[in-house]
Image (cartoon, rainbow, N blue to C red):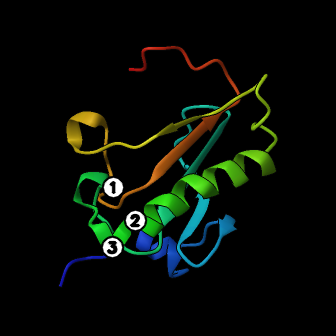
Amino acid sequence: MNEKTVFQKILSREIPAPILYEDDLVAAFHDINPQAPTHVLIVPKKLIPRVGEAEPEDQATLGALLLAAGKIADQLGVKDRSKGFRLVINHGRDAGETVPHLHVHLLAGRSLDWPPG
């Protein structure tokens, strides 16, 4: 039996974390190692290890991640076009993945230069 990811433990309330947003498919909370003044992780409740391993039956969950991002950005006051936010999904170690549980990073609150990295 595989050990639960830290995100599964947060979702099951084994690890306390203030939940900013939650619906039937996803939940969101602040990153403990923020890379911007606003850094929120949006996590599917279903364990999908990484975006490239999602299956066709995960389509609703994948859409829910992006819809939740817009709601959370609005809730946090960063949705306004003059401010803005960035969404990031890492797949694999070289991309910066540290937890094998699909999640979307919502970053805002500072200028986010391009290209990233």
Residue reaching furthest to the left: 1
CB-based contact (under 8 Å), mark 3 and mark 1: no
**Would residue 60 appear left or right of 96 to someone viewing this image?**
right
| Farthest bottom residue in view | 1
Q: Check whether the beta carbons of the residues at disc 2 and disc 3 lie within 8 A of each other.
A: yes
Q: Residue at x 65, y 71 (%)?
A: 22
Eye-nearest disc, 3 or 1: 3
Q: Is residue 97 above or below residue 9?
A: above
Q: Nearer the viewer, residue 32 or 29?
A: 29
Work out whether 110 lies above or below 71.
above
Which amino acid lies under the numbered mark 1 shown in the image of this protein? Val
Residue topped by disc 3:
57
Q: Are the residues flagged by discs 2 and 1 in contact, CB closer than 8 Å?
A: no
Kind of element beneath mark 1: loop
State the residue position of label 2.
59
Residue 44 in the image, given as x and y percentages of width and height: 46, 67
Residue 99 bears which disc, if any?
A: 1
Residue occupying the point 48% across, 14% down: 114
Q: Nearer the viewer, mark 2 or mark 1?
A: 2
